[in-house]
Image (cartoon, rainbow, N blue to C red):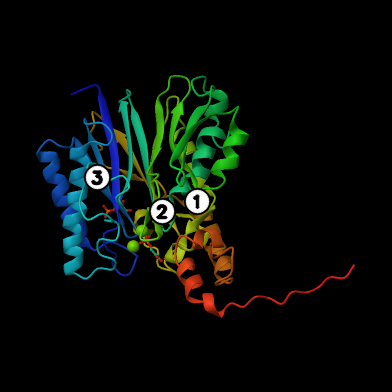
Amino acid sequence: MSDKITLSIIKADVGGWVGHGSVHRDLLATADERLAKAKKDGLLIDYYRGRVGDDTSLIMTHEKGVDDEGIHKFAWDTFEAMTEVAKKLKQYGAGQDLLSSAFSGNVRGMGPGCAEMVFKERPSEPVICFLSDKTEPGAWNLPLFKMFADPFTTAGLVIDPSMHDGFDFEVHDLMEHKKIIFHNPEEMYSMLAFIGAPGRFVIKYVYRRDDGEVAASTSTQRLNLIAGKYVGKDDPVMMIRCQSGMPSVGEAIDPFAHAYMVAGWMRGSHHGPIMPVAWDQDTPNRFDGPPRVVALGFQIANGILGDPRDMFDDLSFDNARKEALMAADYFRKQGPFEPHRLGLEDMEYTTMPKLMEKLKSKWEAEEKVEVKV
Ligand code: 13P
Ligand code: 13P
Ligand code: MG
Ligand code: MG
């Protein structure tokens, strides 16, 4: 075995059961069979198949590095096989995230989301994988900032010498397809000016400055203009390495004790609170939400993921859930009005241009009013 392993999460929504709420067990069984075979054939060291709402995550360890064609093709073929089952069962939006008609090298920009990192396994390697539904790639900006730059969240930034130099954040501009590194803490205010706009600027990686070690990776997607619509804004996943110079497990999950506001609820067009839930509560039903996040804690050993722990299955997140439910009631009372509904700028990437075109002839010029001075 090489001294480095790759952890990859490749995820997609290939059909919802019922509507956009969950994944039918026959689709999950297809993923499980294929994952088991890939491990037996030696492509993967290990795997775990996760799910949140209508999104299935293939969580995989292997030795092939990021963007590996074999790994990405395996994931793509798996989602295609699941889509076949979804079509037979007439699942909702069968093949939703397979935007391209054929695989071409890696899944980036093709619909599925993908977060990967390569690292040398430490003597103990706790990793948390966060999976979300009914939100957008930038939804991780706030918790990542708290985990890696906010000393009120992460005590280690103050008291662990190997974290004291801070962390570098790689931020991507999804529209312009550019990236930048912000050194924290000294460039924190500049960084916040960008990551505070999570619909466009998204944290892709976080690195420890002490030694350049990768600490976090997200499934940030570049947005592609397909058929006049921006696509790729979909339910993201994220992986965080914890302990020993990284945020502790508790520091990594603490940001979710607040049900902060994200975009992506109902038809991808509404703001709402993100609710941390246990795996048996991962189905967004009310108004197709509220948005949800589950957390799977792995203690990786020689590339073996082992059994994950359900990190939000804990009563200390009950208040966050209550807060989310209260915020959901508050937002829902506002119906089609902003800011529950997304702002015009975001709606422009969806249905607004069509509606504007349709109503073009109905709009009349306003009478000019002479203002006398
Ligand atoms: P299963 O219990 O179906 O394996 O799902 C795990 C999970 O990740 C749920 O979100
Ligand atoms: P997904 O992105 O999870 O498929 O949700 C789509 C939607 O419109 C839910 O209302
Ligand atoms: Mg869906
Ligand atoms: Mg989804």
| Near-viewer residue (51 or 318) | 51
In this picture, residue 297 sits left or right of residue 183 = left
Given the image, on which type of amino acid does mark 1 rest?
Answer: Gly
Point out the tag, 2 or 1, that comes first from the N-terminus: 1
Counting from the top left corner in percent of width and height, residue 186 is at 60, 27
Helix, strand or loop at disc 1?
loop
Residue pointed to by mark 2: 233
Residue 122 placed where, x, y %?
33, 24
> For the point 47% across and 49% down, which residue is it?
139
**Nearest-to-viewer mark from 1 and 3:** 1
Instruction: Calculate the distance from the C-alpha at mark 1 to the C-alpha at mark 3.
Output: 29 Å
Q: Is residue 148 above or below residue 131?
A: above
How many residues crowd around disc 2 within 10 Å: few (fewer than 14), some, or many (20 or more)?
Answer: many
Under mark 2, the amino acid is: Lys
Category of crowding for the residue at label 3, using alpha-carbon neighbours closer than 10 angstroms: few (below 14), some (14–19), many (at least 20): many
Residue at mark 1: 199
| Residue type at tag 3 | Tyr
Q: Residue at x 20, y 64 (%)?
A: 86
**Res. 48 mark:** 3
Please indicate, yes or no, whether residue 44 appears anywhere in the rendered image: yes
- Label 2 SS: loop
Does the beta carbon at disc 3 come under 8 Å from ligand 1?
Answer: yes
- Residue nearest the observer in this picture, 173 or 307: 173
> Disc 1 or 3, which lies upstream in sequence?
3
CB atoms at circles 2 and 1 under 8 Å apart? yes
The part of the image, by quadrant, that contains residue 151 is top right
Q: Residue furthest right?
A: 373
- Tell me the SS state at disc 3: strand
